Image: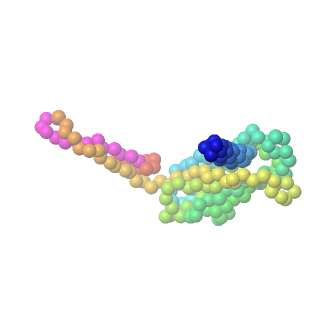
Amino acid sequence: MIKIRNKRIALLLVLAMLATMFVGVGTASAATNFTDVNSSYTWVDADEEQTSGEITISDNNKFNATYMPTTPDTMWIEITLPEGVTFTDNDSDTMTIDRAWKPTFPIELGSYELDIDSDKTGSITAKVAVWYTLNDGVLYEEASESQIIAKINDDKVNVTAGKAKSVNIGSDQKGAAITVKENSPASFE
């Protein structure tokens, strides 16, 4: 009798655990993004005014009564740059753009002139946030997405050599494969 009761309790615990797992999955998958954010990048130099790649916001085919039952007044887009990079136009690391409802998709935000600190290296990643307002209140807000809009030229070349092995060319000689890789375009001459 005790064994049967223990099996039933164990089965109930397993079913309860599975039920909580499915509730969490259902909640996470219920979040809706109304737009897709994409970007291209350009190769730039640090310490100069440079042009970024383009940022494009596309309709995620979810602007309908099922997902967005209330029509917003305005769509807002905010682009935030990392530390050490600012927009040349407003000398700030943030730019906010508003679009009257309903915008025509895709929205091509185009390229921006950037001021880049001389010690900046690697990729320049912009955070792009999109939200919708109605009567000056936030109606829907989408999580910001990080997009690479520029990569900094470092003019470095990585050279590696493989393990030396015997090569039968004339006398007993050693040889190894040498790999040369550019970190950015035109860094190898």
Q: Return the residue nearer the eye: 132 or 185.
A: 132
Please say whether residue 38 is visible from this viewpoint: no
**Helix, strand or loop for the magenta stretch, by majority:** strand
The residue located at (87%, 57%) in the rendering is 135
Residue 82 falls left or right of residue 36: left
State the image coordinates of residue 28 (x, y, percent, origin top left).
Answer: 69, 47
Magenta segment boundaries in residue numbering: 169-182
State the image coordinates of residue 15 (x, y, percent, origin top left).
Answer: 67, 43
Residue 50 falls left or right of residue 169: right
Q: Quadrant of residue 116?
A: bottom right
State the image coordinates of residue 126 (x, y, percent, origin top left).
Answer: 61, 55
Which quadrant holds the N terminus? top right
The residue located at (64%, 55%) in the rendering is 127
The residue located at (23%, 44%) in the rendering is 164
Determine the residue located farthest toward the left in the rendered image. 171
Magenta residue check for 172: yes
Residue 141 falls left or right of residue 111: right
State the image coordinates of residue 2 (x, y, percent, origin top left).
Answer: 62, 46
Q: Quadrant of residue 163?
A: top left
The residue located at (40%, 53%) in the rendering is 156
Please say whether residue 26 is visible from this viewpoint: yes
Q: Return the residue nearer the eye: 15 or 42.
A: 15
